[in-house]
Image (cartoon, helix red, strand yellow):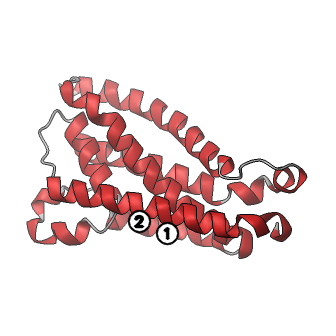
Amino acid sequence: MLLVLAGLLPWQLFAAALNGSSGSLVSNSSLIYKIYFPRRIVPLSALAVSLIDSSIVFVLFTGLAAWFGYYPTWHWWLLPFFVLLAMGAAFGIGLWLTSLTVKFRDFRFIVPFLRQIGVFVTPVGFRTDFFPNWRGLLALNPMTAAVDGFRWCLLGGNQTIDPIGLGFGCVLITVIIVNGLWYFRRTEKSLADVI
């Protein structure tokens, strides 16, 4: 039970941040064309809201973990790193989706579908070390590193973490953020006209 809950924490953080950031420019359109400010702040503020929501769920998880005998260990000190991984993935993908949602309004209907598919291709309900032959394929999902890291931190190191998969996940998330920033900056000048 705690295994699945520890996997759901980063996924819920990612899904809420992605949902909020993907529609952030359209929902704040009146702000976009009235005054000029760095428009990257709008998707970034959606990430902050999801982080606050996730911290409430984290407190509930902490109580449940204590009930089952899992107490904080030194691994918890590394949890902010994995939170940043999940937020980075949501930020990079969210920049793409928010830009595409401004241009093509039907993308707001695609995002919930992508989130539902994503929960099944992310190791939320299963451990990656049970499928050693599939670890390379699972590492292509940027959230795999965050989910494995959350489990490793919250369950006191009882779960294994693949250092190669973690490194690949960090590189992949960095590429996603840089690519998302590039695309957002490329379309940023025309956003106020399209909205």
- The answer to whether residue 63 is visible is yes
Q: Position of residue 135 (x, y in %)?
A: 17, 66
In the rendered image, the vertical position of residue 103 relative to residue 50, given as above or below: below
Q: As drawn, is 189 to the left or to the right of 89?
A: right
Q: Residues within 10 Å of mark 1 (few under 14, many from 20)?
A: few
Residue at horizontal 38 percent and vertical 48 percent from the top: 85
Q: Which residue is mark 1?
A: 114
Q: Position of residue 83 (x, y in %)?
A: 39, 41
Residue at horizontal 65 percent and vertical 52 percent from the top: 40
Q: Position of residue 141 (x, y in %)?
A: 33, 65
Q: Which residue is mark 2?
A: 118
Q: Position of residue 51 (x, y in %)?
A: 51, 38
Query: Considering depth in this image, is 88 or 23 the residue closer to the camera?
Result: 88
Look at the image and tell me in which quarter the C terminus lies. bottom right
Query: Residue type at mark 1?
Result: Leu
- The answer to whether residue 123 is visible is no
Q: Residues within 10 Å of mark 2 (few under 14, many from 20)?
A: some
How far apart are the two marked residues, 1 and 2, measured between alpha carbons?
6 Å
